[in-house]
């Protein structure tokens, strides 16, 4: 017999990182209450670390869209893989040239493009797609706030989130 309903367990599991961050902030505030310069500095550092972790945790929760779409996403050592019923493939993060949010086959999907013409579409609600947040956050110059805003915004045909700027080569 379970103490909590399955919906409550699912909600707690989804917000687990944010809950841990809130506990860290609370611990820092408790250390601050001890008084003295040493404990003030230590408590302030713990509060800042917890607040930073909390910000990232909330962004990750807002990024995750559940697992309602077909297919599985895999992120391993700088490479994103998608295995779907109709298509799939791999894209290396180091080779990525553009990241877009598009409408693809009636659902919203990430469009990952490489300079050689390789394009990979990943539904935003595919199983394991929450791992893409950390992968995308490592792209140079990507604004994670803009990434979340694009997901929360209205559905449009295509929205470019990030594009790699490569210096022009002189001939």
Image (tube, helix red, strand yellow):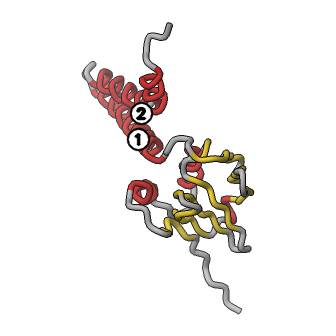
| Residue 99, x across and y down, in percent | 57, 65
Q: Which residue is mark 1?
A: 58
Foreground residue, 17 or 87?
87
Q: At 36% across and 23% down in the image, what residue appears?
A: 27
Q: Which residue is mark 2?
A: 18
Kindly report the distance in space between the C-alpha atoms of the residues bearing marks 1 and 2. Answer: 6 Å
Q: Residue furthest top?
A: 1
Q: At 69% across and 74% down in the image, what residue appears?
A: 115
Q: Earlier in the sequence, mark 1 or mark 2?
A: 2
Structural crowding at the residue carrying mark 1, measured as other residues with C-alpha within 10 Å and reported as few (<14), some (14–19) or many (≥20) = some
Q: Is residue 138 above or below residue 1?
A: below
- Assess whether mark 2 and mark 1 are in contact (beta carbons under 8 angstroms): yes
Tell me the SS state at disc 1.
Answer: helix
Tell me the SS state at disc 2.
Answer: helix
| Residue 105, x across and y down, in percent | 59, 61
| Residue 121, x across and y down, in percent | 63, 60
Please tell me in which quadrant of the rendered image residue 89 appears. bottom right
Q: Quadrant of the C terminus?
A: bottom right
How many numbered circles does the render carry? Answer: 2
Foreground residue, 105 or 35?
105
Q: At 38% across and 59% down in the image, what residue appears?
A: 153
Q: Residue furthest front?
A: 106
Please tell me in which quadrant of the rendered image residue 35 appears. top left
Question: Image check: 28 left or right of 79?
Answer: left
Structural crowding at the residue carrying mark 2, measured as other residues with C-alpha within 10 Å and reported as few (<14), some (14–19) or many (≥20) = many
Q: Is residue 167 above or below residue 154?
A: below
Please tell me in which quadrant of the rendered image residue 24 appears. top left
């Amino acid at each position: 017999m379970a103490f909590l309903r399955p919906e409550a367990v699912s909600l707690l599991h989804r917000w687990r990182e944010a809950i841990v961050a809130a506990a860290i902030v609370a611990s820092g505030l408790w250390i601050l209450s001890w008084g003295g310069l040493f404990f003030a500095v230590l408590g302030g550092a713990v509060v800042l670390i917890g607040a930073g972790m909390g910000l990232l945790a909330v962004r990750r929760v807002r990024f995750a869209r559940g697992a309602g779409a077909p297919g599985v996403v895999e992120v391993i050592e700088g490479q994103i893989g998608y295995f779907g019923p109709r298509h799939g493939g791999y894209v290396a993060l180091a080779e990525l040239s553009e990241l877009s949010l598009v409408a693809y086959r009636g659902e919203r999907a990430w469009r990952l493009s490489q300079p050689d013409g390789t394009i990979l579409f990943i539904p935003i609600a595919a199983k394991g797609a929450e791992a893409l947040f950390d992968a995308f956050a490592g792209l140079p110059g990507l604004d994670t706030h803009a990434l979340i805003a694009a997901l929360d915004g209205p559905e449009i045909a295509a929205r470019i989130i990030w594009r790699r700027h490569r210096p022009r080569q002189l001939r």
